Amino acid sequence: MAVEHSLATVLMVVEVVLAGGMMLLIPHITRRGLLFGVYIGEEASRDERVPDLVRGYTLGGVAWMAVCLAAGVGLTATGMLPRHVMTLALPALTLLGFMVLYLRAYCRSCELAVTGGPPPAAACLVPGREARTILPAVAIVVGACCGVFAMAYAWLHYAELPARVPTHFSLSGVPDGWRPKSVVSVMGLPILTLVMGTGSGVIPLLTARAKRAIRYPAAAASAEAQARFRLAVTRYLAAGALAMCGLLTNLSVGAINVGLGTWPALRATWAFTGLLLSTTVGGAFLLALRYGQGGARLERGAETAPLTNGLADNRHWVLGSLYVNHQDPAILVEVRFGLGYTLNLGNWRAVAMLVGFVGLIMTIAAVSLVAN
């Protein structure tokens, strides 16, 4: 129990530091001209109110991280909430507080927003390095293969499993939750492995073809920075998809082996979890520090030129983070506050993909809960 408590405490600290740390970093890596999801223009970025807004957001974020950490440790130490519940809820709680801080800063940033008509359209005619789709394709194939393997492994051993099978495990990998054997309780995780593994590989494939947001003039330097950033994000997402496939496949196969009694606990779970975290979280910090938002750290000599097209048009951004433009055929566009790309919710194809993927995941979860 002491080991479990120590692991849970360490995990909570890591969760708060990583989730909060990334949110604190975002305002410092944003493209020039953008402020908390609002296009204020490159000249207005030197306004004296800008550092005050960033400072207020940063101080509020640090204070909220301290509150979250104290609440997590206190509630688990007193037994008011189970450790596994708090370790799952704490990242969401941390991000929820930062969301409130972001909305406050967004509303104040709107006072500096560029007014008037839409910015001039700019087509990038400068040759640049395009993101290759080989690694995303590999991620899709590996995800599909891992999912099929996990489903086949579970189905081949279905008859050998006891009447009750493990469905939940402690941090040390020992089963602490059991349910009656059924197709849902046994096959739920392998099916999720197939859906998540394949779906997560599609994301970098779409990212490799995402719309570029360039500056004009100085389009050549801006296009090169954006191309390098998009290539890095594509590789990052594909690597994360592969790491997640490894973790889910290990959990699927491990749960069957524990149920059969051939393994006393899950094996290599922490190794796969560490690989996933180092790939996704570590990769995100590396992207932020090396490239900045949309390659902002690479736009030397071009950062004073105005942004063009969708990224500079305040009319199509809801709360500075949701892009809705029915006239824009792009599926993915660069985010205004964050690191990476977001869906164009004005494109029916993007909405259909989002609804289909989320609906499929929710259906699997709902069937699992109802059937057991």
Image: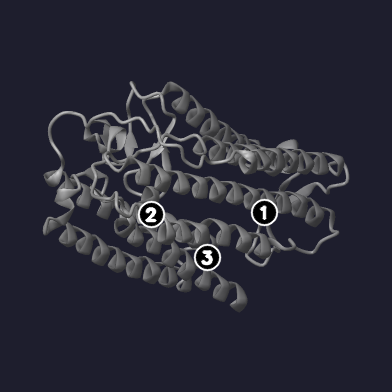
Which residue sits at x=80%, y=46%? 163
Look at the image and tell me whether residue 316 can be seen: yes
Q: Earlier in the sequence, mark 2 or mark 3?
A: 3
Q: Is residue 73 above or below residue 206?
A: below
Q: Which residue is mark 2?
A: 298
The quarter of the picture where residue 372 lies is top right
On screen, residue 29 above or below 206: below
The amino acid sitting under disc 3 is Arg
Residue on which the image places disc 3: 83
Q: Amino acid at mark 2?
A: Leu
In the rendered view, tell whether residue 285 sits above or below residue 226: below
As displayed, is residue 57 above or below residue 309? below
Local crowd size for mark 3, using a 10 Å CA cut-off: few (<14), some (14–19), many (≥20): many
Residue corresponding to mark 1: 247
**CA distance for labels 3 and 1:** 22 Å
Name the foreground residue: 248 vs 327.
Answer: 327
